[in-house]
Image: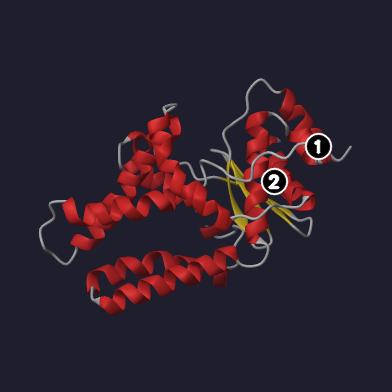
Amino acid sequence: MDAAAELLKQADAALSLPRLGGMARPNGVVIVSERRWAFAGVDGSLREGKMPHPPEVLQRLPLARGLVRLWSSLAPVLRPGGVAPSRERWLILTALLAPLGLAFVGGPWSTGAGIALSLILLFTILRGRALHLHGAEHRAIAAVEERRLVSTWTGAARPSRFSPRCGTNFAALALPVTLIADRVLPMAPAFWSPLVVLVLSLALTMELWRLVQKSSRGFWHAFLVPGLALQRLTTREPTLDETQVALRAVAAVLRHEV
């Protein structure tokens, strides 16, 4: 049996498994736990690393904990030695940080520039086979949670390609929260106000995100509907080979956890 498949068999029988997250790349899949990350490439390559461990006080402080978690989730891509080449890493950082500078300027042209940068960022992230691998990432993580890793590896099981914890769901929440915060937060008119509104909006969205993820009530799950609908655009049905790419990354992370 393949070494990855053997690890998945052990994981299926484990008493407990860590909660995993992930990220699709044009040429592979990143899977992360709280301690480790692994990138499996469509070419058979495998890279691994450790996740950052922010100070415990920041991980427990409301609002701050969400921003810390958001930044940590990007560590496999943005940190030197991660899965993104240096040029792409700078492009992603520019697309992420430029809206902060544009917020100070204002005006219709800055809005257009922000939209253009967002489109560039989406193209960078979702080019190539990323849409199919995004679906594979979700399927592999669902297989962990349903303890159907081996059957998913062989193709006997096909867990959903849609995920309630996908970053697409977070983005779908962040947009309305930012628009509402821009109108209701009692901010004094100052040049730094747009930056404060944006940071607070992201922090508030992460707190709402945590509440939705922890709640078992249908009312809170209604907040996931826009993001799950959006995943019909950001994912495609993966092939078995693409699902196995994601499962290899899962096996590499669980090798340190099981």
Quarter in which the C terminus is drawn: top right
The quadrant in which residue 197 appears is: bottom left
Instruction: Please name the residue shown 56% across and 57% down the image.
Output: 234
From the top left corner, tell me how far across and down residue 248 is, in percent: 74, 45
Q: Residue furthest bottom?
A: 109
Q: Position of residue 122 (x, y in %)?
A: 51, 65
Identify the residue at the far top of this view. 15
Element marked by disc 2:
helix
What amino acid type is highlighted by mark number 1?
Ala
Residue 96 image position (x, y, % from top left): 41, 64
Q: Secondary structure at mark 1?
A: loop
Q: CA distance from mark 1 to mark 2?
A: 19 Å
Is 246 left, or right, of 84 in this rendering? Answer: right
Q: Residues within 10 Å of mark 2 (few under 14, many from 20)?
A: many
Residue at the disc numbered 2: 249
Rendered position, 154 above or below 122: above
* Residue 197 position (above or below residue 12): below
Q: Nearer the viewer, mark 1 or mark 2?
A: 1
- Circles 1 and 2 in contact, beta carbons < 8 Å: no
Residue 19, placed above or below residue 236: above
Q: Say if residue 221 shows up in the picture.
A: yes
Please, is residue 230 above or below residue 151 in the view?
below
Any part of residue 72 in sight:
no
Which amino acid, by three-letter code, is at mark 2? Ala
**Which residue is pictured at 49% across the width and 67% down the height?**
121
Give the quadrant of residue 207: top left
Side (left or right) of 203 relative to 93: left
- In the picture of the structure, the residue carrying the numbered disc 1 is 156
Mark 1 vs 2, N-terminal side: 1
